[in-house]
Amino acid sequence: MPDVVIRPVTPEDDFDAQVDLGQRAFGIYSPAQKANWLYTARLRARQGMFLGAFAGQQAAGAAIFHDLRQWWAGRAVPCAGVSSVKVAPEYRGHGIGRRLMTGLLAAIAARGYPLAALYPATMPIYRSLGWELAGGRYHATIPARSLRDLLAPDAAVAAGPAEWPAVR
């Protein structure tokens, strides 16, 4: 296996190779998904928030992070949202994912984020790097008839700021 270098993805890199890597990891993108992903990936590359693993000129892996906020005790706290983590099948099992995520965490910490969040497809690598499952997603079903007895909204709050367009 050739030496693999972990470095920021730049706007000059081959984004078709990045799309190919993403499709091999996550499945085929529709034209709209591809356009959306390319827009976001190029933006994150310009912002220095896109890290790649390269074997020579070949994309072997990549990960992106996004500038997010989480609310803790009524206060917005900066959070790096990790996404698009992938390693090409032919490069898996050689520690590239660990090196990639270690580099990404260093970039996140260098920007001062106190939190990082992701939706893991597998836990062992992320748990070994310090992530833990937290929070939850809940689903509630409320019969529509239950909404009849709700209090009417406060007219001053419901109107919103004057610059909001009216909803009809």
Image (spheres, helix red, strand yellow):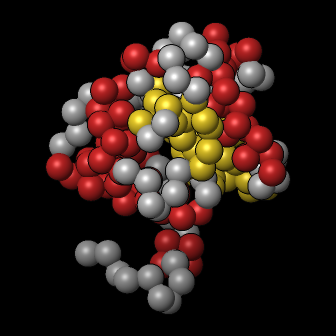
Q: Can residue 115 be seen in this view?
A: no
Q: Residue at the location (21% across, 52% down)?
A: 32
Q: Is residue 68 above or below residue 7?
A: below
Q: In which quarter of the image is residue 95?
A: top right
Residue positioned 57% across, 13% down in the render: 94
Q: Quadrant of the C terminus?
A: bottom left
Residue projecting furthest to the bottom: 162
Q: Where is residue 28 in the image (x, y as percent from the top left)?
A: 22, 33
* 83 shown above or below 127: below
Residue 121: image location, x then y, percent: 49, 19
In this rendering, position of residue 53 left or right of residue 32: right
Residue that sits furthest to the left in the current view = 31
Q: Which residue is rendered at x = 31% and y = 27% of the image?
A: 24
* 156 vs 135, nearest the viewer: 135
Residue 158 visible: yes
Residue at 67% across / 27% down in the picture?
99
Picture quadrant where residue 22 is located: top left
- Residue 55, above or below 52: above
Count of numbered badges drawn on the protein:
0
- Residue 40, quarter of picture: bottom left
In the depicted structure, whether residue 129 falls above or below residue 159: above
Counting from the top left corner in percent of width and height, residue 47 is at 59, 63
Q: In this view, does 65 lie to the left or right of 18?
A: right
Where in the figure is residue 116, as x and y percent of width and height?
Answer: 70, 39
